[in-house]
Amino acid sequence: MRERVQAALNQVRPTLQKDGGDVVLIDVTDDGIVKVQLTGACKGCPMSQMTLKEGIEKFIKAEVPEINKVEAV
C-alpha cells in the first residue's frame, strides 16, 4: 500500500513544486492513515490545510481507496 500512496504523491508533487512547495511521505499506518510532511512554501502557507484535505487527501483516496485520511506531521 505504501508504494501505491507514494505513486499517488508523485503525481501530485509537480503541482506543489510549481508553487515552491513539496510533500514527503512519512508513514502509512495499518489502519489507513497517511502521514505526510509539507515542505517549502507549503509548510507555512495559510492554505496548507485546504491543500492537504481538498487536494492531496482526495487524490490519494481516489488512487488508494483503502486510505482513511491524510494528516500532516
Image (cartoon, grey):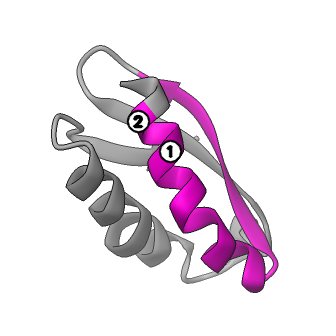
Q: Quadrant of residue 32?
A: top left
Q: How many marks?
A: 2
**Which range of residues does the magenta coloring cover?**
4-28
Query: In the drawing, what numbered circle is on residue 7?
Result: 1
Does residue 59 belong to the magenta stretch?
no
For the point 82% across and 78% down, the residue is 20
Foreground pick, 72 / 64: 64
Q: Quadrant of residue 1?
A: top left
Given contact means CB atoms under 8 Å apart, are the residues at marks 1 and 2 in contact?
Answer: yes
Image quarter in which the C terminus is found: top right
Q: Could you classify mark 2 by the number of other residues whose Cα lies within 10 Å: few (under 14), some (14-19), or many (20 or more)?
A: few
Give left or right: position of 32 versus 46.
left
Name the residue tied to disc 2: 4
- Amino acid at circle 2: Arg
Q: Position of residue 22 (x, y in %)?
A: 72, 62
For the point 63% across and 64% down, the residue is 13
- Amino acid at circle 1: Ala
Magenta stretch: dominant secondary structure: helix
Q: Position of residue 8 (x, y in %)?
A: 45, 51
Q: Position of residue 48 (x, y in %)?
A: 56, 73
Q: In what element is the residue under mark 2?
A: helix
